[in-house]
Image (cartoon, rainbow, N blue to C red):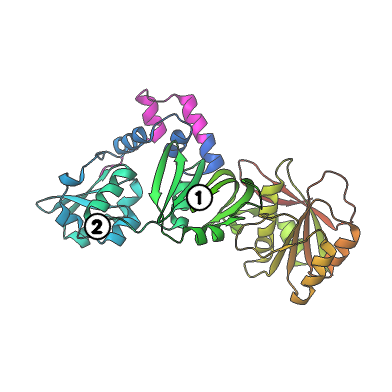
Amino acid sequence: MTKRPIRLGEMLVQMGRVTADEVERALAHQQAHGGYMGDALVALGILSREELWWGLANQHDIPFVHLRPENIDHALASRVSAAWAAEHRILPVLWDEGRVTVVMPDLGGVERLDEVRLLTGATEVVPALTSPESIAELIEAVHGPAEGVGLAAFLAEALERGATAFGVSARPGRATGWYRAGDVVCRALAPEWRDALGGLVSPAAPPAGETAWSAVARVGGDVRTLECHALVSGEATEWAAVSGARLAADAARVEADAALVRRAREARRAGGVAARVVCPPGAHRAAEALLALLPALLLGDGARAIHLSDRAGAAPPGTLVVSTDGSVGAAAAGLEPFVPDAVTVGVEALAADDLMALRRVAPFVAVLERHDAAPAAEFDCVARLRLDEGGPAWMLE
């Protein structure tokens, strides 16, 4: 396979399919949401998903095909297991005197060509692109209906492709995951999707009596805010989320200036440090999610931290969150026996007595107040969160 030294956007401009301004829009979308250039073009409605596959195939000088199950070599295709084919979304489909053609829905499959050669006994393996729907249909024709992809893998695929929205349609005996990245892509989900959702999104279910709510998702290392919606009728459920700000790949990839790191790590020797956290206007949900990750960034992955909050879904799943139930001081008193390294707090407002109670719990305390009035409590320093195209970063003022 010969890869041409031309970028996808440049090639599409040369062919007259997109304009230079549309490429710039796609680049800005890619920087804000991650993923690939082609997925950004689809998400913005500049290209259809079929045009993207055709463009990628043309860029890398490989064919784009759409095969029917009756047109492939089933004996050859069955040389790879159902689990392997479903996990990697790759299937060998044609044999020509030792030369095997495999189909895949994206170029990531080229890393598996050596495995295909060993599994099939081929002397040469040639890749071809096809649609996700086509590869799913071919795998089912060869191996039977799939048990369904895990929800974590499905959401990771959606976010990697720059999905603007995703969700689950569940009916008795089946569940379908979907995401919108220009076109809508659907996958059959494993039966455990509901339990998995609770470990990925916080809160996964709406507060009582509501059908729309804000949440935070943690899929692999990707942390995002979400606007969630749900409809439930008997045993049928529709769950959907609109993807919001991308907060961090992981705590280690969020930047923090050296002065803030030093201040946090000297907190125990200094008798404790309480930091007031400030963020850009309207970014409190993103700031609170990143705030819960701050101790690992400043103190190391082994830091023992607890997050206090007066609202549900304030921190990524996997974070130990304690509800203040309206009283920060009472919640802080209940934490003293655990001697954590750090406590992070997200509240509407904090009283001076509440901060004194927090100082007795941990040597490093960081507090985000969501109102705009001057703080009632006296802090040792101010940590400012910066959110821009360069990524999130914490700075000491």
- Where residue 338 appears, as percent x and y from the top left, is 74, 75
Label 2: which residue?
A: 143
Q: Is residue 272 above or below residue 42?
A: below
Let me know if residue 342 appears in the view: yes
Looking at the picture, which amino acid does disc 2 mark? His
Say left or right for 51 vs 376. Answer: left
Q: Is residue 31 above or below residue 215?
A: above
Say left or right for 352 vs 136. Answer: right
The residue under the point 90% across, 53% down is 376
Residue in the foreground of this view, choosing between 185 and 16: 185
In this view, the residue farthest toward the bottom is: 337
Q: Which residues are magenta?
A: 1-27
- Where residue 354 appears, as percent x and y from the top left, is 86, 61
Dot 2 crowding, Cα within 10 Å, few <14, some 14–19, many 20+: some
Residue in the foreground of this view, choosing between 162 and 327: 327
Quarter of the image with the N terminus in it: top left
Residue in the foreground of this view, choosing between 340 and 269: 340
Q: Is residue 30 above or below residue 291?
A: above
Question: Which of the two labelled residues, at mark 2 and mark 1, occupies the earlier sequence position?
Answer: 2
- Classify mark 2: helix, strand or loop: helix
Q: Are marks 2 and 1 in contact (CB under 8 Å)?
A: no
Looking at the picture, which amino acid does disc 1 mark? Thr
In this view, the residue farthest toward the front is: 234
Label 1: which residue?
A: 237
The residue under the point 16% across, 45% down is 70
